[in-house]
Image (spheres, rainbow, N blue to C red):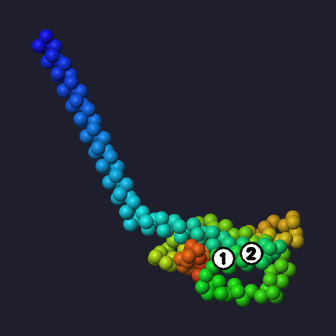
Amino acid sequence: MARSIGKTLSTIGRGRGLWVAAVVVAVLVMVSGVGAWWQAAHDEQLESAKSRDTVLMQAQNRIETMNTLDYRKVDEGLKAWAGATTGTLHDSLKEVDDEDRKLLKEQKKISTGEVLDAAVSELSEDSATVLAAVEVSVTDGEDKDAEPTVKRNRFSADLVKTSDGWKLEALNQVPVNLS
C-alpha cells in the first residue's frame, strides 16, 4: 500500500510539473510575441517603408492620370489632371483655355498612360521625388482600325503631401541618352 501511495504521489508530482512547465512555456511565448509585436509596431524602418509605399502608389496613379486624356471627355480629363496636381503644376492647368480645349477635341486622340516601373528616390515627411518609366498608348479616335502609337517615357515627379494625399507639384520628362 505504501508503494501504491508513493507511485500515486510521484505521478501527481510529474503531472503538476508538466502542467507548470506548460504554463511557463505559454507565458514565455506570449511575452515573446508581445515583444515582437511592440518592436514591429514601433519600428522606424517599418513606418518609413509604409510611407514609401504610400508615396509610390499615389505617384503612380497621379502620373498615369497626367498621361491619360480622351478627346471625347476633355473637361473630365482636365478635371482629373487638376485633382492629381498641386502648386505651380496645378496653377498652369488653370491656364488651359477654351481654345486649347477645342484643339484637344479636334485632334481626336485618346492617350492612356501606364506606369511600368517606378521608384522613390527621395522622401521626407512632406515631399518626395519619384522616378517612373511610363508607356503611353495614343489611339486615333477617327480611324478605328489604326494601331495605337506607343511611346515610352521616363519622368521625374516631385510630390507634396497635401490634406488629400500626395499630389504632383512637378512632372518632368527625363531625357534618354541613346549614345
Q: What residue sits right under mark 1 in the picture? A: 83
Residue 89 percent coordinates (x, y): 63, 84
Q: Amino acid at mark 2?
A: Gly
In terms of image quadrants, where is residue 142? bottom right
- Quadrant location of the C terminus? bottom right
Name the foreground residue: 154 vs 21. 21
Q: What is the count of numbered marks? A: 2
Q: Amino acid at mark 1?
A: Gly
Q: Secondary structure at mark 1?
A: helix
Q: Is residue 167 above or below residue 44?
A: below
Disc 1: CA contacts within 10 A as few (<14), some (14-19) or many (>=20) = some
Residue 125 percent coordinates (x, y): 46, 76
Residue 48 percent coordinates (x, y): 44, 68
Q: Secondary structure at mark 2?
A: helix
Query: What residue lies at 81% left-to-right and 87% top-to-bottom?
Result: 98
Q: Earlier in the sequence, mark 1 or mark 2?
A: 2
Name the foreground residue: 5 vs 137. 5
Residue 174 percent coordinates (x, y): 60, 79
Q: What residue sits right under mark 2 in the picture? A: 77
- Quadrant location of the N terminus? top left
Query: What residue lies at 51% left-to-right and 65% top-to-bottom?
Result: 53
- Asked if the residue at tag 2 contacts the one at tag 1, i.e. Cβ–Cβ closer than 8 Å, the answer is no
Disc 2: CA contacts within 10 A as few (<14), some (14-19) or many (>=20) = some
Give me the C-alpha separation between circle 1 and circle 2. 10 Å
